[in-house]
Amino acid sequence: MPLECKAVQPDYDEMTQRNIGLLTPEEQARVRSLRVAVAGCGGVGAAAAHHLARLGVGELRLADPEEFEPTNINRQFAAYVDTLGVNKAEAVAAELRRINPSLSLRTFPDGVTKTSVASLLDGVDAVVDALDFWSLDLELLLHREAARRGQWVFTSQGVAEVTTVTSFDPSRTALDGMVCDAGVPSRSRTIRSFLPVLPRAATPELLARAIAGELPSVPLDVLASSFEATFLVNELMRVTVRDLPAHAVAPDLLVFDQDDLELRFWDAARGDFRS
């Protein structure tokens, strides 16, 4: 039997009332003024956009050129049987409008491109980099434009049970230094920078295939995507709303082991975990 819903436009303060206590009223007002660009609306990006919408941000810009397919249903927000074949940015925006019709939403169904990146980032307060792990050229395009504009970029990576999160301060380490060798994007450098601990199932053979570009996908579930998005949004809120430092600023990382429920800080300069 279909649900009968009446159209209601709740007051913003009522919708965000349960945030108060975790946020001060002044901080909630800052949340409301936030404009955030989300590059990539898959497992992490869509979940991060969902968190931000429920927190009460004022504007989200969503960029993704892909359409939902059956393999997305296990973990991606807005992936349903009836959204298969629908552009991810458009589908996520439709779901977010159901949460908060007054939320300002702009979609970029062509994704991050040389022609769209300026419009995507123009005037935003923060950037979520949820692009595919191996889309290095696009990530460099996004990060370089954000750095030029003085914008923080928040990103996370997840493979099986291992999640890493970091924040890019535009005045400090650039993504180039973590993913390039001699100015050229490198998969092996990217793995070393973002995965100081490899998943337990990562054999030397699988690692070699990943570096060679022979692995089209990696195992991920809704728990891993949720952990990534939660840690990422928490860092974004610390920097943009609460005037607190990020826990990990690139090239340092927060590293979370989903199986052991262990969160550690990777000190890139030391090449070791900080006790």
Image (cartoon, helix red, strand yellow):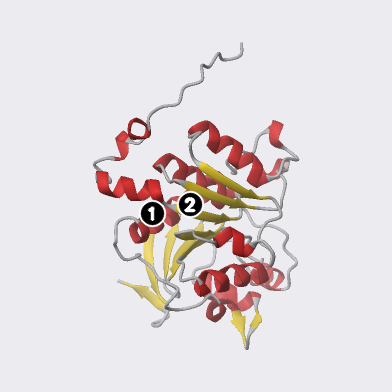
In front here: 191 or 250?
Answer: 250
Q: Residue at x 67, y 56 (%)?
A: 111
Using the image, tell me which numbered label, if any, was put on residue 44: none
Viewed as shown, does residue 13 lie left or right of 138?
left
Residue annotated with mark 2? 229
Quarter of the image containing the C terminus?
A: bottom left
As displayed, is residue 104 above or below residue 173?
A: above
Whole-percent x, y for residue 121 in the image = 55, 61
Whole-percent x, y for residue 246 in the image = 35, 65
Answer with the quarter of the image where residue 120 lies: bottom right
Viewed as shown, does residue 254 lie left or right of 198?
left
In front here: 197 or 98?
Answer: 98
Residue annotated with mark 1? 234
Type of amino acid under label 1: Asn
Q: Residue at x 66, y 45 (%)?
A: 88
Q: Residue at x 48, y 34 (%)?
A: 100
Type of amino acid under label 2: Ala
Looking at this view, name the residue that lies furthest to the bottom: 182
